[in-house]
Amino acid sequence: MEGTPKHDRVAGLLRRAWGSPLLLSLLGLAATRVWLQCNMFGSYAQSDDGIVSVVSSFFYGGAMIAAALLAWRRPPSARAERAMGLWSFFVMTLATLVIIVGKENGSHATVMMAAVLAGIGGAIGGGMWTVVYRRLPLNQSVFYGFASLGLGSVGGLILSFLPNLASYVASAFMPALAFLGFQQAFKIPREKPAPVPVYDNEPRASVLRFLAGVAAFSFALGIARGFPVGEAVPFDAGMRIVHQLGVVALSTFIVWWAIVARRRMSFKFLWCLEVAVMALGILLLSLFPGSLTGAGVAIVNVADTLMLGVLWVTLQDVARHSSTHPYVIYGAAWAARVLFRNAGRILIALVGSSVTAVTSLAAVLVCAVVVSMVLLLSSDALKARPLFGARGFYEGGSAPREELPAEVSLAVEDVRGATARAVTVGAFADGGGQTPTPDDISLQERFGLSDREMEVLAPLSQGRSKAYIADMLFISENTVRAHVKRIYAKLDVHNKQELLDCLDRHRF
């Protein structure tokens, strides 16, 4: 039987995740997000924590910019990257303790000091994970990134129903969990050879368009957080559930779509989903002011939180295929998100709640979302990798193309007016980059290879180990061995060198 049933693939994925360094990486990143929700946004018992969130976000974005500039000037060493875990543990824990003291004593100055520490600690605590995720293939980043997002929402929802002091005390343990997970995650080996830095060739204008699109959307999010009167909107139990479980539902859907169903996944797909959720929130705020304001803001918060996952996996792909340090890439994009969201939040706080102001702000909100769509979904956006292409990095169950260098064309091509796959596997046997023509016979057709065998053959011909291929395709090593045995039989080879020779002889 060709291929692997969906339930076997999911079972293999979970078996591989459990007990691996990636599992603790998942839990550690989720713990970081739970801490951020509690210490920067008041556990989302309302749309944000008012002035505390504004101050924290300002220093959060400022710390991101500082880290980006420092890494741009002098990329940190591996030792310095690992030291970030200890720094995050110290600053995040200290921030929580200062918040507890300030809340208990009613000291506004102490709470503001804690907000500053929370912003800086949050930047370190989130940013440190970028060097870990850079080591993952894109499909694994999607799984662990969105699973972490959903798990963090569950934790945040639980904390939101605890008394304030209890929630802060519980969050004080999160930096320790994140630190332990971060240390364990460094067991993930660096990939050799390193992925080709194709994003280095992106036009600067494309990068600026991306950052501008992120900034415009974030500005709209900031306005919506305090809409319509400029103050944080209280969330009752129902609205908290809508917010957090909405994120869980969308994260689960994305993981199912990309990993289980193996459907097309692209930045455009993710961003259209993001815009759809945001549009629903704006619609409720505009058409039903007052009666459904809480529901509208809760849905806007779903879009805000979902944006964390969308940006995370997008920037992970850029960082993985770029010679620029991840701190620079994540720092620039995250600063654009946080600071412009803060600008929108400050704007609505200053404008007030007059009818004219509310109408004008609603128009600005809609315009900002439209501008972000134009900037991020146009043909002039980033295009160096399949993630930004129309077909994305999966295509109907074909091999995950993000594993291949840019010059390798592992893609689904309609070469005969049908759906035959024309995969230039031979091209990477000797570093070539030839492109198939409509008259060529694909390697798959020539040797009668199945779709799954082609998925295994591509990384196998690059010298990847069976364990690596199993992780990449979310199947067991025994299944990989069975596919390799059948590939060898069909190509009439007996070892890897003979396989490479065969591919070289039959390259397009």
Image: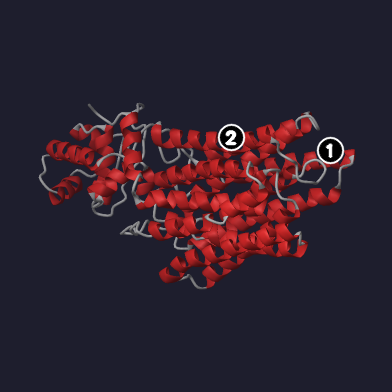
Q: Could you tell me which secondary element the residue under label 1 belongs to? A: helix
Q: Nearer the viewer, residue 109 or 130?
A: 109
User: Could one spot residue 7 in this view of the protein?
Assistant: yes
Chain-order first, disc 2 or disc 1? 2
- Residue matched to label 1: 359
Query: Compared with residue 273, is residue 348 higher up or lower down, i.e. above or below?
Result: below
- Residue matched to label 2: 246
| Figure coloring | secondary structure
Density class for disc 2 (Cα within 10 Å; few <14, some 14-19, many ≥20) is: many
Image point (36%, 42%), residue name: 400
Residue 473: quadrant of the picture: top left
Closer mark to the observer between disc 2 and disc 1: 2
Of the 4 image quadrants, the one containing the N terminus is top left
Query: In the figure, is residue 35 to the left or right of 134?
Result: right
Q: Could you tell me which secondary element the residue under label 2 belongs to? A: helix
Gap in angstroms between the C-alphas marked 2 and 1: 28 Å
Image point (80%, 42%), residue name: 361
Report the amino acid beneath label 2. Gly
Query: In the figure, is residue 268 to the left or right of 304?
Result: left
Report the amino acid beneath label 1. Thr
Q: How far across and down, in percent of the image, does residue 310 sit?
A: 54, 45
Q: Nearer the viewer, residue 318 or 382?
A: 318
Of the 4 image quadrants, the one containing the C terminus is top left
User: Could one spot residue 321 in this view of the protein?
Assistant: no
